[in-house]
Each structure stands twice: as C-alpha cells, then as structure tokens.
Amino acid sequence: MQQDGEDTALNETELSRQAAEAWRQGDLITANRSFAELARTRPSEPRHWMNLGVGCQAMGVMRDALKAFQRAVLLQPGLPRHIANLGSMFDPVDHGKLHSIMVRRLLIADPLDAEARLAQAARALAQGRKQQATSDARLAALLSPDAAQAQFLLASADKTDTGMVTHLQRSLVLVPGDPFGAHRDLERLIGRRTDQALSSSYVAGLFDFYAESFDAHLTGKLRYTAPEVLERLLQSAFGDMDGWADRAVDLGCGTGLCGTMLRPHCRYLIGVDLAPRMIEKARANGAYDDLVVGDVVEVLAGYSAPFDLVIAADVTTYLGALDPLFASVAAGLGPGGRFGLTVHALEAGDFAIGWAGTYQHSATYVEAMAASVGLSVELTERGAMRYDDGQPLETLYYILRKPF
Ligand SMILES: C[S@@+](CC[C@H](N)C(=O)[O-])C[C@H]1O[C@@H](n2cnc3c(N)ncnc32)[C@H](O)[C@@H]1O
C-alpha cells in the first residue's frame, strides 16, 4: 500500500515536470496528454482538472475543457480561479445567463475581482439599473484603474455633464481605439467633432452583439424596409435588363437582408462587413458567393476587377465623413456602374451624430460627395428606412451612376 502511494507521488512529480516542459515549449499535445494522465492518476486533485481544462481550451476542445473546469469547481467550489476558468467558457453574448451566473458566483468567492465587477456593471447598465451599475463601475475603477470600460460605464451612469466628459476622456486616454463609443458621446455632449466618431471596434462589437437577434429586431420592431425600397429603385434604374450585375458588392452586408434581394439579379455577389458574427449569419443565409470581414473602404480598395453594382444599405449611419467611401466606390465601379445607398437625412450642414446616436448626412453633402468623384444622381427618393424608439429615420435613398 505504502509502495503504491509512493509510486503515484513519483509518477505525479514526473508527469507534472513533463507537462510543464511541454507547455513551455508550446507542445500542447504532449502537455495535454500529461495533464489528462495526471487527472487520471489522482482524480481528487482539483489542480490537475484545472490544468487539463486550460490545456483543452488552448487546443480548442471546448467540451472537454468545460468538463474539466466543472470537475475542478466541484472539488474546490470556493476557489475564485476555478470559477473564473469555468466562467471563461461562457460567452457573454451566446450564453448571457450562464455568464452572469458565473460572474455572480465569482464575486461571492472574490468580491474584489475587477473583471467580474466590470461584467456585472455592464449588465446592470444594459438592464437600466443605473445605481447598481455606478457602484460596480466605481469599485472596478478602483480595483483596476487602467480599465477603460470602467471609465466608460461611469460616464454612462454619471448624472452630470462634466463628470461624464471627464470619464469619457479618461477612457479614451486608456484605450484610444475607442471600443465603447466615447468619441460619439463626446460629440453629443460637447460638440467635439471628429470625422469618424464611431470606431471600427465599436461598430464591430455592437453588431457582433446584435447578430443573433438582428433580423427579427430590424424587420419586426424597427420596421426596416431599405432592401425593398432599394430593390424597387434598382428595378426602375435597370429597366427590363435581364441581370443587373456581373459583379456586385454589398457593403456592410450584415446578415444578408439585401443579399437575398440582390441574389437573383447578380452573377457574382460579394458581402463585406466589419462584424464577424454578422458575416457568419450572412454565410448561413447562402446569398453570397464570397464574404469578407473588414472595413468597406479598405476591402473595396483591394479589388482590381470592376463592379457593376455597389450597395450600402443603412451603413452610412455608421460612417461620418463620406469622402473615403465615395472615392473607393467610384474607383471600384466599372463604366456605367451603379451605387445604391441610404442615408439618414440631415436637414442642414454636412453630417453629424444625430438623435439616434448614429450619423445623419444632408442631401447637399451626399450630392457634393457624388459630384466630387464623378458620380451622377440617377434616382433619389425620401422615406423612412426604419424606426428608432418609435421615431422614423427620415431617409434619403440614392441610385448614383458612373458615366460610360
Ligand atoms: C444596420 S446594419 C445594415 C445591414 C445590411 N446592410 C442590411 O441592410 O440589413 C449596418 C451594418 O454595417 C456594418 N458596418 C458599419 N460600418 C462598417 C464599415 N466601416 N465597414 C464594414 N461594415 C460596416 C455593420 O457591422 C452592420 O452589419
């Protein structure tokens, strides 16, 4: 008996050494084999299950990682590290409820876990519980003064304009890439204007979060009709031509609502979007021949073969200055090519963050942009592409054309 116990201990020491060495060298397969062997050798040791979970997670074997983390938590329920590992298996978007349960459990085990505090503050704010959000964000900011999200949440929860501005500015100093939309809020609060107040990381994060419920929300509650109106305008622009385009691109394609409309009319259809989860949905929709994750201007500039048709439906709402977009569309279109787009109308000026928290552009500005890159207005119409908070988004629809 004694002999067996000593053998197991020896075996464990040797296996742990092998695992650590393999891990250091990046040999995940050998490391994981040793972690699994360790867990089999002494299944009552939570550390072995935790290591096995981390190994499986690194190798992308998520089901096994989940099982291993669960075993570690069951064996040692109060240890924050085990709860945090198990919590990391639940994405806040895909498994919102489970993620928030894990956050709560982690805060019981370790009330000073800054990341969990932040997650709890963000959830409270999203649910309109401002007081809870403020107190969690305050504590998170104390625990982790470098957390830009804590500053941003404090700004959203703050009652005074000066307090909000200070927190927003602090969040920008901490993360200049602005994934939370601080530039947008500064423009609304103090009119501090930039050409692009909605950063790529903010837009991608917003739509990744929104991807699952996007179609139902947009076409249901928000009464989105841009694809139908653009289809009617394109039909009248193309007349009784059989196909509209040999090559077409849907910029900011989202889940593919316009792709479904365009598919029967285009031989080769490309979709481009910043948000990977929107692109996944568009892929499942099946309307596109190719899909690309990226910024519309950058992706368009990468194509050399010309397009016959470019579409941007409800996309300029996320772009401030339109000169980069118009320049790359004009360069990407072949002779006679068409550009169909929508803008949320602004009555005076050029463009600004409007009441909906997104961009509005004036007709004068859009038409000047078009003229500056040699596109003429073939058709235009006014309407309301969707509603926000029950209010219509006054919309300008355009079909622009490049000369032959
Ligand atoms: C309101 S949705 C509209 C989606 C689609 N055009 C439709 O009509 O259903 C706006 C989409 O534009 C994308 N988007 C915004 N700015 C972008 C950019 N600079 N580059 C690529 N995609 C962008 C967003 O990720 C989002 O999926």
Image (tube, rainbow, N blue to C red):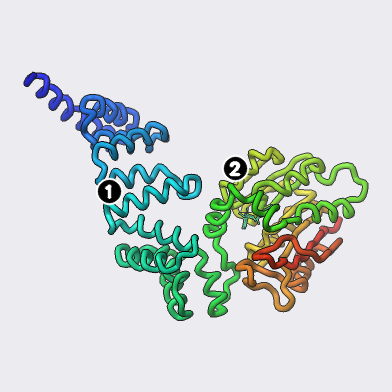
Image coordinates of residue 173 in percent, x first then y, are 42, 69
Quadrant in which residue 377 is drawn = bottom right
Q: Toward the viewer: 233 or 67?
A: 67
Q: Is residue 56 left or right of residue 362?
A: left
Question: Label 1 neighbourhood size at 10 Å, few (<14), some (14-19), many (20+)?
Answer: some
Q: Amino acid at mark 2?
A: Glu
Please give the name of the residue rendered at 75% of the width and 40% of the height, measured from the top-left corner.
268
Question: What element does badge 2 sit on?
Answer: helix
Q: Toward the viewer: 14 or 70?
A: 70
Label 1 within 8 A of ligand 1 by Cβ = no
Is disc 1 in contact with disc 2, using a CB cutoff of under 8 Å? no
As drawn, the label of residue 161 is: none
Quadrant in which residue 347 is drawn = bottom right
Reading the image, the residue beneath label 2 is 280
Quadrant containing ligand 1 reads bottom right
Image coordinates of residue 174 in percent, x first then y, are 40, 66
As drawn, the label of residue 80 is: 1
Please give the name of the residue rendered at 36% of the width and 64% of the height, measured from the top-left corner.
136
Q: Amino acid at mark 1?
A: Pro
Q: Is residue 60 above or below residue 298?
A: above
Question: Label 2 neighbourhood size at 10 Å, few (<14), some (14-19), many (20+)?
Answer: some
Q: Is residue 374 left or right of residue 117?
A: right
| Rendered-image quadrant of the C terminus | bottom right
Please give the name of the residue rendered at 58% of the width and 54% of the height, measured from the top-left corner.
207
Q: Nearer the viewer, mark 1 or mark 2?
A: 1
Image coordinates of residue 323 in percent, x first then y, are 68, 66
Image coordinates of residue 6 in percent, x first then y, are 9, 24
Q: Is residue 76 visible?
A: yes
Q: Is residue 231 above or below residue 32?
A: below
Q: Is residue 39 left or right of residue 402?
A: left
Q: Earlier in the sequence, mark 1 or mark 2?
A: 1
